[in-house]
Image: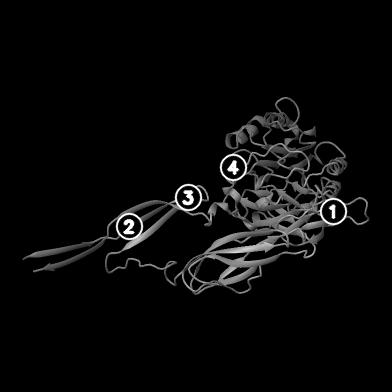
């Protein structure tokens, strides 16, 4: 008996090609600002600011409350660090065990002892807030290390400027009185573009859980009239209102996803003040169920919606527009249940100088050749100049292997179809009559049942080579391209037995 085995190996040469190349005028992926997660933007060292100063570009504040000690609260702090926040604004209830040193140590271990961390007192902090070794002493020590001055009783009835943002902290229902008058006076005397009014407790209809009326409507109404964002905690969930023209009566001024802040002009009869309120109470201690609802709520995220611990991030001076901010709530699992824009017409020159329109082209997409891409862009504008008082928008092709057909090229939300497979870069442009802004996104079009672009792939019947390209860029002018031709080994085994 004779046994014969024939082994056939077919392979292609492995070639490593390393070359530097010039890419001036090409698209720089790092120049885009993501509308979902600006974590690619490194934390900016925001200077101590004076009233009227704009924030640094893409300056991010993390809003939390109701924190605790342990893995959940540490996960939230790590999320803040990962997202590149430049400061934390904590609306009360720190560690729940009256241990100021442990609470401060938890912050330092993740964010560092010199990270800007501002906090208003919560009801669970009251017993150890004042006095030697109290929460206020640790907060003041951090402010002094950073050289940040403040006015008043820190965390109880105080105000400060940081990163071009004016922050007013009060403690209605916990310490002190006349907080509404303090808010009115502070906001009236300040000329900052961005104002935040921060405290811990709520009124019943300004949360969706089991809390009762504890603050009075005055603090809400004075904050709204002054064009300040209203930041609270106390209820362990996340909720945000629409833009309101009256908080006490829950009067909705607009349901648009771009909320335009304005302050009241005391010399006129109408009340022009417009703002919104939120509860960001998922700092790590617990997650509660929803008990209430109302048509003034724009977003609700509780145990009933599958909520996990997380943070509301506000990105100010978004994409270089000092009067535009982008907000998103993100939990520690990476879920983003709420995104919205805020535009300020408050402070400075009253917001009447024209600012470039804000543009977000939307997320990158992958589609098959037979399908269309649904484009979901966003633009914001201040209505200046008037005329025209509005922006015109246009979708266009930046690069790609074929001509793109846009269903409605001048619509922010439209569809695009593609003639051949490949990678297409699309641009959304907004023009307000004076300034033009744009943003880009990528659509990868795959062949039906295959990958995008042309080129042979290795089949099952013989040897072939697949190409993998790696591209990294440190700046706009040069990069490194590595082409790795990977051998495909075809092994055939034939046997004949006699």
Mark with earlier residue (3, 2): 3
Residue 77, position in %: x, y? 61, 42
- Residue, disc 1: 273
Above/below status of 217 relative to 450:
above
Q: Nearer the viewer, mark 3 or mark 4?
A: 3
Q: Residues within 10 Å of mark 2 (few under 14, many from 20)?
A: some
Placement of the N terminus among the 4 image quadrants: bottom left
Mark 3 vs mark 4, CA separation in Å: 30 Å
- Residue, disc 4: 81
Taking 383 as reference, is 10 left or right?
left
Q: Secondary structure at mark 2?
A: strand
Q: Residue at x 87, y 52 (%)?
A: 264
Q: Is residue 288 visible?
A: no
Which residue is most to the top? 132
Mark with earlier residue (3, 1): 1
Q: Nearer the viewer, residue 429 or 459?
A: 429
- Residue, disc 2: 486
Mark 4 vs mark 1, CA separation in Å: 34 Å
Q: Nearer the viewer, residue 477 or 171?
A: 477
**Answer yes or no: do the residues labelled 2 and 1 have beta carbons within 8 Å?**
no
Could you tell me how many numbered marks the image carries?
Answer: 4
Q: Which mark is residue 478?
A: 3
Taking 245 as reference, is 26 left or right?
left
Q: Nearer the viewer, mark 2 or mark 1?
A: 2
């Amino acid at each position: 008996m004779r046994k014969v085995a024939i082994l056939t190996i077919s392979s292609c040469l492995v070639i490593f090609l390393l070359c530097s190349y010039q890419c001036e005028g090409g698209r720089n992926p790092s120049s885009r600002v993501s509308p979902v997660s600006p974590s690619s933007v490194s934390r900016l060292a925001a200077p101590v600011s004076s009233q009227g100063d704009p924030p640094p570009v893409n300056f991010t504040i993390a809003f939390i409350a109701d924190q605790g000690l342990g893995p959940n609260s540490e996960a939230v702090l790590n999320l803040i660090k990962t997202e590149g926040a430049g400061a934390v604004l904590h609306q009360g209830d720190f560690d729940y065990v009256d241990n100021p040193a442990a609470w401060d140590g938890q912050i330092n271990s993740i964010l560092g002892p010199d990270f800007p961390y501002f906090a208003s007192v919560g009801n669970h902090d009251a017993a150890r807030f004042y006095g030697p070794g109290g929460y206020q002493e640790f907060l003041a020590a951090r402010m002094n290390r950073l050289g940040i001055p403040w006015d008043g009783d820190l965390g109880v009835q105080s105000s400060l400027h940081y990163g071009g943002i004016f922050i007013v902290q009060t403690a209605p229902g916990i310490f002190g009185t006349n907080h509404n008058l303090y808010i009115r006076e502070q906001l009236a005397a300040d000329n900052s573009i961005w104002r935040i009014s921060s405290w811990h407790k709520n009124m019943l209809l300004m949360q969706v859980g089991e809390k009762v009326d504890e603050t009075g409507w005055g603090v809400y109404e004075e904050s709204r009239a002054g064009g300040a964002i209203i930041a609270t905690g106390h209820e362990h969930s996340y909720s945000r209102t629409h833009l309101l023209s009256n908080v006490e009566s829950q009067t909705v001024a607009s349901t648009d996803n771009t909320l335009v802040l304005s302050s009241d002009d005391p010399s006129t009869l109408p009340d022009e003040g417009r703002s919104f309120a939120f509860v960001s109470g998922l700092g790590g201690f617990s997650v509660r169920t929803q008990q209430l609802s109302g048509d003034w709520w724009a977003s609700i995220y509780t145990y009933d919606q599958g909520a996990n611990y997380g943070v509301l991030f506000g990105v100010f001076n978004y994409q270089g527009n000092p009067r535009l901010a982008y907000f998103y709530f993100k939990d520690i699992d990476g879920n983003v249940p709420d995104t919205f824009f805020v535009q300020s017409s408050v402070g400075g020159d009253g917001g009447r100088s024209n600012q470039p329109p804000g543009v977000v082209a939307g997320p990158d997409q992958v589609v098959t050749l037979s399908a269309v891409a649904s484009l979901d862009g966003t633009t914001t504008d201040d209505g200046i100049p008037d005329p025209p008082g509005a922006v015109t928008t246009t979708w266009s092709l930046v690069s790609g292997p074929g001509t793109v057909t846009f269903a409605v090229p001048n619509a922010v939300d439209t569809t695009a179809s593609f003639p051949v497979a490949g990678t297409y870069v699309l641009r959304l442009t907004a023009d307000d009559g004076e300034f033009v802004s744009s943003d880009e996104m990528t659509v990868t079009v795959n062949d039906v049942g295959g990958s995008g672009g042309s080129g042979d792939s290795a089949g099952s019947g013989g040897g072939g080579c697949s190409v993998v390209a790696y591209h990294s860029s440190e700046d706009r002018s040069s990069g490194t391209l590595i082409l790795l031709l990977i051998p495909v080994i075809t092994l055939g085994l034939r046997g004949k037995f006699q």
